[in-house]
Image (cartoon, rainbow, N blue to C red):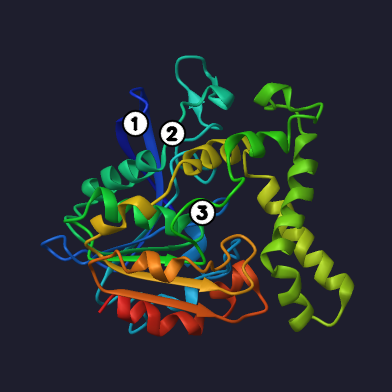
Amino acid sequence: MTQILDIGDLPLASGEALPAVQVAYVAHGRLDSDGRNAVLVTHGYTSGPSMLSTGHHTAEGSWAPLLGPGRPLDTERFFIVCSNMLGSSFGTTGPSSINAATGKPWGPDFPRIALADIVRAQHRLLDKLGVKHLRGVVGPSYGGLQALQWALDHPGMVDGCGVVVSGLHSPAGFDGASARAKFADHPDWHGGWHYGHAGLRERLFEQRVQTLRHYGLERLYEDRIADPAERQRLMASGARQWADRFDPNSMVVLAEAAAAFDARPRLAELRARLLLVQCTTDAIFPPVAETRGLLERVRAPVRYTEFESPYGHMAPGIEWRRLEDELRWLLP
C-alpha cells in the first residue's frame, strides 16, 4: 500500500527551497533495529512506486516476481522501499501539487530540480523511516541514473549500485525542451497551464501508446495474445489509465533533472559494488562499445551484463528470471 510522508522544506541544488514536500512510497519487509538492512528500489521516468506491486505494469515491466521471502529482493532479509520521485505524478510533490502560495497547481512554476535533488528527497524520506545504511540502490531506466547518483552522493551509505536497462549518462535528446515540445502545439497546453483543460489527455494517451510500443510491449502482446483486437484493447487500457494520472509538466521537470547527468567523469569515485545490465535491443539505453573500458575506472567490484531479448527496454521486467543471479550478486 502506498503511504505518504511529509519531509518538510527541501533545499534544492539551484539554491531555492521547495516547501512542505511530501513523498509517496511503498515499503516491504522490516527494518532492523540498527537501520542497516534497507534496499531502495528506484523507478523509471514515467512510472511510480507500484513497480514492486502485483497487478501493476509499468514501462519497465513489473518487478513484483523478484520480491518476497527468499527472492532476490528478500523481504525476510531486507527492508525494501520504493518511493515516487520528486517531481513525478504518483503522490510525491510535483507540478500537479498545490502551491500553497497561490492555491493552484505549481504547473510550469515548479522549481527546477536536479537528479541530486531527487536523491536528497529520498534520503530525507529514508532518514525519517529510520534507515541508516543501504545494502543497495537498484532500478531500471531512469531508476538506474538515480542509483548512480546515490552511490556518488552517499559513498559511505550505499553498498551496492544496480543500473538496469540504463546507462552511465542520460540518453541523447532527453531534455526538458524536447519533452515540452511534445505538448507545446496543443491548444490546451497554455504554456503548461493545462489544468482544467481535458483535451491534453488525448495527446498524453497517444504518446503513451507510442512509448509502450517503442519499449517493447507490443512485441510481448504479439507473443502472448493471439487476438489483435484484444492486444490493442489492453494497450489502450493501460495507456488510458496512465494518461488520466500523469502530468505532462512532470515529464518536462524530470527530463530537465536528468539532462545534465553524466557519471562517466566520476566513475573512479564509486565505492559501491556496481551492477550494469543492458539489453542489446534496447532503443533507449543501447549498449555502446566504450562501456567496458569506462568500467575499468571503477575501483569497486563490477559486474556488466549484456543480454539478448526481443523485448528491448522492457526486457528485465518481462524476463525477470534473468535478473535473479544479477541481483543476488548485488545484494549478497
The quarter of the rendered structure image containing the N terminus is bottom left
Badge 1 density bin: few <14, some 14–19, many ≥20, Cα 10 Å: some
Q: Secondary structure at mark 1?
A: loop
Give residue 140's position: percent from left, percent from top: 48, 63
Whether the residues at callouts 2 and 3 have beta carbons within 8 Å, the answer is no
Calculate the distance from the C-alpha at mark 2 to the C-alpha at mark 3. Answer: 18 Å
The residue labelled by disc 2 is: 113
Q: Quadrant of residue 75?
A: bottom left
What residue lies at 18% left-to-right and 59% top-to-bottom?
133
Give residue 225's position: percent from left, percent from top: 79, 80
Badge 2 density bin: few <14, some 14–19, many ≥20, Cα 10 Å: many
Most extreme residue toward the top, as rendered?
A: 102
Q: Secondary structure at mark 3?
A: loop
Calculate the distance from the C-alpha at mark 1 to the C-alpha at mark 3. Answer: 23 Å
Q: Is residue 319 visible?
A: yes
Q: Secondary structure at mark 2?
A: loop
The mark closer to the camera, 2 or 3, is 2
Q: Earlier in the sequence, mark 2 or mark 3?
A: 3
Identify which amino acid the numbered label 3 is placed on: Gly
Most extreme residue toward the left, as rendered?
A: 34
Q: Quadrant of residue 249?
A: top right
Whether the residues at callouts 2 and 1 have beta carbons within 8 Å, the answer is yes
Q: Quadrant of residue 79?
A: bottom left
The mark closer to the camera, 1 or 3, is 1
Q: Which mark is residue 251?
A: none
Q: Which mark is residue 13?
A: 1
Q: Is residue 1 visible?
A: no
Front residue of 234 and 280? 280
Identify which amino acid the numbered label 2 is placed on: Ile
The residue labelled by disc 3 is: 48
Give residue 211's position: percent from left, percent from top: 71, 56
